[in-house]
Image (cartoon, grey):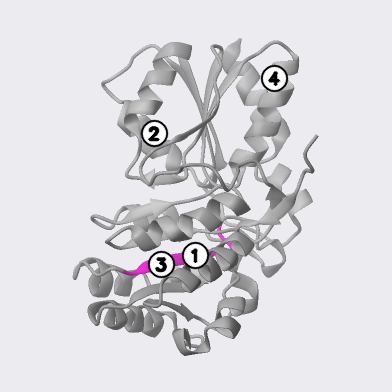
Amino acid sequence: MSEVKYLATRAGYGQGLLDAGAAHEDLVVLEGDLGNATGTAAFGKAYPERYIEAGIAEQNEVGMAAGLAAAGWKPFMTSFAIFTAGRACEIVRNAVGFNHLNVKLVGSHCGITPAKDGGTHMCIEDIAWMKAIPEMVVVNPCDYNQTRLMVEKLYEYDGFAYMRTSREPVRVITSMEDDIEIGKAQILREGKDLTIASTGIMTTFVMEVAEKLASEGIEATVLNYHTIKPLDTETLLKHVTETGNLLTVEEHNIYGGFGESCTSALFGKVSGIKYDYVAVEDRFGETGDRQSLYPEFGLDNETIYRKAKALVK
């Protein structure tokens, strides 16, 4: 039996930068004074000439990344999600997006995982902000391995994109041998009774719930949406049609999030399905720890299990 590992996706991002940085001399990293927290510090030590410390000035940091991209570099701009997607949103739109520049934006500490930093640092709006920008690709890998692989995939993608990473260690459920593709959902389990579509670290919890359901004779299909935009509607439609139900799971506000993308994609294409969601119920974060806040916000395994069972009934 293989060892169960728990690692943070931000650590996967840091290792992914080291992997890609060794292979590509035109990759540069910009950081907003949070390198030890976001995972970029190791890249800075290995490649100091390609590591730019922008300080606590995220709007300037995005502008610098845009200039580097215009000069032919491949920049990865990093800060906490609330600053990358929030504070710098207008600069992302006008400097990067409007000019179609090849900049990769990374928002660490997304969702409610920066628990002890309080509600001001909990970004539950970034998917909505970023997916609303025309042509923006939005990715949200589920674990350490997938985040590490996604760095290379983003480097290879010619265009601008936003990636979420998380503070908390979660169970590693994927392999470095997985053949992931931007814009294509990953099928982690197949079952006839229920379809669960999940994104980000919540997928690791969904897999635990799916195992529990299987022990009770309920077989769930688990679709891991590491890419939220563009959304793989074809895979979603196929499995929802087969099971007749859908549970979406995300660590984001229900408004503007992954669940809305799924229901919008299915609208007019399928009827008579049962639907429910696990997401933040339109409220701000609060100070605490992960063990207390996940149940408080309805993002815990028990909530996923209860809603999944209700759909099957």
User: Element at badge 3?
Assistant: strand
Picture disc at residue 306: none
**Earlier sequence position, callout 2 versus callout 4:** 4
> In the rendered structure, does residue 105 fall within the stretch colored magenta?
yes
Local packing at callout 1 (Cα closer than 10 Å; few below 14, some 14-19, many 20+) is many
Magenta span covers which residues? 103-110
Residue at mark 1 to residue at mark 4: CA–CA distance = 33 Å
| Kind of residue at badge 3 | Leu
Coordinates of residue 235 in the picture (x, y in percent):
38, 27
Residue behind mark 3 = 105
Q: Tell me: residue 192, above or below residue 230.
A: above
| Kind of residue at badge 2 | Cys
Is residue 257 visible to us here?
A: no
Residue at mark 2 to residue at mark 4: CA–CA distance = 23 Å
Q: Tell me: residue 205, above or below residue 306.
A: below
Residue behind mark 4 = 213
Q: Nearer the viewer, mark 2 or mark 4?
A: 4
Check if mark 1's residue and mark 3's residue have beta carbons within 8 Å: yes
